[in-house]
Amino acid sequence: MNSKYNKIQLILDHLKQPDYRYKQIADAIFKKRIGEFERMTSLPVVLRKTLVNELGNSIVNIKPVLKHISDQAEKVLFSISDEKHIETVHLKYKRGWESFCISSQCGCGFGCSFCATGTIGLKRNLTVDEITDQLLYFHLNGHNLDSVSFMGMGEALANPNVFDALSILTEPGLFGLSQRRITISTIGVLPGIQKITRDFPQVNLTFSLHSPFDFQRSELMHVNKQYPLYEVMKGLDNHLKQTGRKVYIAYILLRGINDTSEHAKAVAELLRGRGYWEHLYHVDLIPYNSTDKTFDRYYKSERKSVINFARILKAKGVNITIRNQFGSDIGAACGQLYGSTD
């Protein structure tokens, strides 16, 4: 694993420092919220200087360059290496719960037709540190990391570094997050789903469906040609059986395209009759959020269509939630992240 935390351990080993030094550094970062090596006064001066020389003084290596704030959402544009940008969304709920939507890639190579991020193309995978630093930035600025979702820019399960990032986020001596407070969203990258089932079985899994019809899903989401819906569903069935954890089915409603009664009935047919664990499938109905990149192609479903869609699913025994969207006015909602400096 190529992360700053491993590099710190290597430096300590090279300098023949006692084992407790690493815990001192971790405690300084995660308990005392100290973001610079020079300020870690519990460490010897020589060690501090070595850490600064080797890793730089700042613990966080991504830089905030632009912020947009609305009532309950904050979107931060970060500058990463090679002059590229990513976006992270901080959501604050009225009860005080703080949630973070982080990016796993700069851009995205899958090109889902309704998503602004997909219009960029894939610039590159984020490193382990670039993924975890998004959360570390907020932690060092006094925020509570109550829940984390990999729903920002990119397809999380297409970046191998995400799995190392999960190890760091759940490491007791570092972020110390419970797997159950982390959500991975995927458009159906089957090998990644299988790895989550095997290595991180308590992490919440969300599958972006958006059409129950194979041919239409392939038009909306080209990934369906690589990982067909029926194969992905078998992988999700196995996940349910192995973990006993819910799988959330994300469904963005597009007016006149995938919000008809026929679509609702087909979604119910897809999810029912799958065996003893089928009750663990839960559908999240999500309003479409327009962007400058996709505004002329799709429109938000009318309220009556949303209610009808939900009614059909409920009548057929499917668990559903109609999601409220935060941050659409600042381009921070589902499908809107673009990494723009405007």
Image: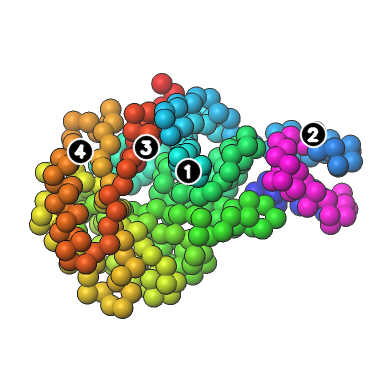
Q: Position of residue 60 (x, y in %)?
A: 64, 37
Q: Who comes first in sequence, dot 2 or dot 3?
A: 2
**For mark 3, does the 10 Å Cα neighbourhood hold few (<14), some (14 to 19), or many (20 or more) residues?**
many
Left or right? Give the position of 174 relative to 334. right
Q: CA distance from mark 1 to mark 4?
A: 28 Å
Question: Does the magenta run of residues contain 26?
Answer: yes
Identified by mark 3, the residue type is: Phe
Contact (Cβ within 8 Å) of mark 2 with mark 3: no
Where does label 2 land, which residue? Answer: 39
Q: Residues within 10 Å of mark 1 (few under 14, many from 20)?
A: few
Give the CA separation, mark 1 to mark 3.
15 Å
Q: Earlier in the sequence, mark 2 or mark 4?
A: 2
The amino acid on which the numbered mark 2 sits, given as a three-letter code, is: Arg
**Which residue appears at 55% of the width and 28% of the height?**
64
Rounded to the nearest angstrom, the CA distance separating label 2 from label 4 is 50 Å
Q: Could you say which is closer to the camera, residue 46 or residue 329? A: 329
Between marks 1 and 2, how big is the CA–CA gap? 34 Å
Whether residue 234 is visible to the viewer of this picture, yes or no, is: no
Residue bearing mark 3? 326
Q: Earlier in the sequence, mark 1 or mark 4?
A: 1
Q: Which residue is mark 4?
A: 300
- Is label 2 or label 3 in front? 3
Q: Seen from this angle, which residue lies furthest front? A: 95
Q: Earlier in the sequence, mark 3 or mark 4?
A: 4
Residue annotated with mark 1: 95
Quadrant in the picture for the N terminus: bottom right
* Numbered range of the magenta stretch: 14-39
